[in-house]
Amino acid sequence: MKNITIALAGNPNSGKTTIFNKLTGARQHVGNYPGVTVEKKEGFIRYKEYEIKVVDLPGIYTLTAYSIDEVVARNFIIDEKPDLIVNIIDSSNLERNLYLTVQLKEMGIPMILVFNMSDESRARGYRFDIEKFSRFFNAPIVETVGNRGLGIYDLLEKIIALASQRHAFNNTYDIHYGTELESEIENIRMILESKPSLDRRYDLRWLSIKLLENDSDIIKKVNPLDIKKEVERSIHNIQRLTGEMPETIIAEKRYGFISGLCQKAVHSTIEIRHTISDKIDRFVTNRLLGIPIFLCLMYLVFSLTFRFGEIPIGLIEDFFKFLGNTIETRLSSESDNMLKSLFIDGILGGTGNVLVFLPNILFLFFAISILEDSGYMARAAFIMDRLMNKIGLQGKSFIPMLIGFGCSVPAILATRTLENKKDRLTTMLVIPLMSCGARLPIYTLIISAFFPKNLQGPMLWSIYVIGIIIAIFIAKILQTTIFKGEPVPFIMELPPYRIPTLRTTFIHMWHRGWLYLKKAGTIILGISVIMWAISFFPELSKEEIDYFENKIQSVKSSIKDEKEQLKRLTAIENEKKEKKLSSSIAGSIGRTIEPALKPMGFDWKIGTALMGAFAAKEVFVAQLGIVYFVGDKEEVSDTLREKLKEKYSPLVGFCVMLFCLISMPCMSTVTITAKESGSWKWAVFQLLGLTIIAYIITTIVFQIGNFLGIGMN
Amino acid sequence: MIDNKSGIPLAYIKEGTKVQIIRIDTNELLKARLNAMGFVPETPLYVVKNSTKGPLVISIKGARIIIAFDIAQNIMVA
């Protein structure tokens, strides 16, 4: 068994990932490059007597240090030294794709060129002289149609053929960058050669070219060699002699070479007409129709997600209930009470919180994958861009925010499409203000308890709108203060529309969903157990337990009517629960912070419920139910509503909703923010920031309302 | 070649017009990015979509690229 490592490099949208999936199938693994949030995708395939490790490098247009993707790809090639590079090229877009190819070639590693999407290029009338291309690049060439799996075996054959050629690889054709540039390249090359401390991994010509290109990453790397002056002199020379900067000339020469080559090696048999994509775009990006079409599609995505998600969610909930009941009956003795509670409330409850999201997330990801793979997302970003700019964000920010109305977790995951870190962070931080689905039970409970029928609809609507308005404000403030920076130059490629393959879409969906499960799941589980612990401990004292036990016994013996007995027993159980809650750590915390809650009109009971809500919103309603002796969740409805109405005023009700709206990103959200932003600092900033803002606003609203006598009982 | 090139910013070119790039006047990083996408002096392109102040859709080297209005203001064409 021979082991080789190959790297897949190519433009975004070149079909690289499809080929990666075809090669590695299920044997792939996604992680991160150390220290950065760029995805690292690796997989394996066994072919003949070879075990091939395939690394899918990030999609890039060039090897300059413009973005972290390019630096990561480049560093991988230099540091990890793959045995060969497979350059995936969208052959229907040849010239632009070859820009990367010529740079890869300059790195001096054995390479295979894959002319992918050859069905499309054929349809456009291109015919390639493969022989000529192969000679010019000194590389074997394979024609493929990635999404139909055509040419993959041919590719594998060429890979192992090249891998077994161990002789030295020589650059036959080097691009000639013009007399002035070439002489400076030679100057720098000689200086580099004279430096003994230079890392010999780098091809010297390549290094010289990069230095003249003003590549910031390479400049940093050769800093210790102290050749800054010489390089600057060379650049200045070139400018003086040609009137242009070296990097412009280099780019021109590269394209010149490519153009020349294509003129010799590409034949066009038919005229390029308006493609179907353009025709579709007439409608999709139309000034009037664009936004309505977009909104319809988004609505469809939501219906798909939440309607289809209901069934699996129901199944999962039933499963957990079943598990809970089984454990309940297995461990029935008093001494196992803690263990029982730990399992049911802590672990099952916690895992339940995680898994209950999963169907929705998977469906949402599926829908997003389809939109992305088909090419529509690029259009969506284009359409929403103008509107979002007014808030200081990009068009691409709109989609994560829209998803946030369903659930913050996939919404934050969706911000990955934003390349600019500042925009991405701003979007992530305000996503919790898009009231997620889990807050709905809270709103429903309070609105139905405090407001008359005719006001209920408008109330709900106003809560959502308030959320959006606050989000816009915060986004604007963030963008003008902490995240102040040059607005992102909006450049994006509009790929032609494509029919996505089901297999690729599923793989995309699954790998995003799995990431969420793995990371968020472990942390949420941990925090759930902690939340359980502070609500459980300290246990009731022996006297207290005996007191309740006595009460239960007396009811059982004195009251014969079954219905009455059940009612009384339930009441005692609830009293017991309330006592336990009140004397637990959570309850104590609730009572300690009560003075701080008073300015908002809250008491310790609401405080305790709020803490539970941090774990998951649904807990808020349940906790409130417990705190008011109101039985199980299903029976909550009327009785809890009545109790709330007695105890609090509509103003307080409104304030509770306001507070829940603005603060309370659930712990899943906080965890995901930490992971996606790369640091807990942002997650904490989000949590504290939102909570503080919530506190201030709610206090102001309550105090003013109180003062003016609005909404009082 | 000496600096005396005129040229109109790409931003003001009407839809459906074919032009050629003369020079790019943006900052270094952006220029590198534009280069990589095919925007290089003497490259022909045509404007697919250009509505007031919005991003433009350009057809260049066989691909469609969207660029923001203010970037297009710094690309000189003729």
Image (spheres, coloured by chain):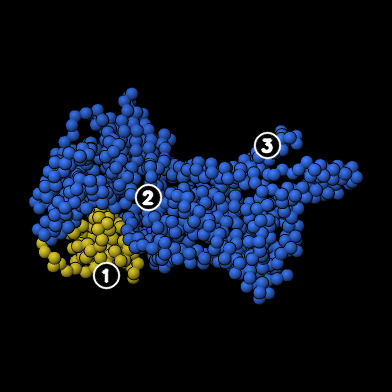
Q: Is residue A658 above or below residue A221?
A: below
Q: A701 and A323: which one is in front? A: A701
Q: Position of residue A82 (x, y in %)?
A: 29, 35
**Chain letter behind tag 3:** A
Asked which quadrant contains residue B15, the reply is bottom left
- Crowding at dot 1, Cα within 10 Å, few <14 / some 14-19 / many 20+, comes out as some
Amino acid at the residue labelled 3: Leu
Q: CA distance from mark 2 to mark 3?
A: 54 Å
Residue that mark 3 sits on: A339
Residue at x-position 10% and y-position 62% = B1
Residue at x-position 89% and y-position 46% = A559
Q: Colour of chain B?
A: yellow
Q: A469 and A380: which one is in front? A: A469
Q: Colour of chain A?
A: blue
| Mark 2, secondary structure of its residue | loop
- Can residue B58 be spotted in the picture? yes
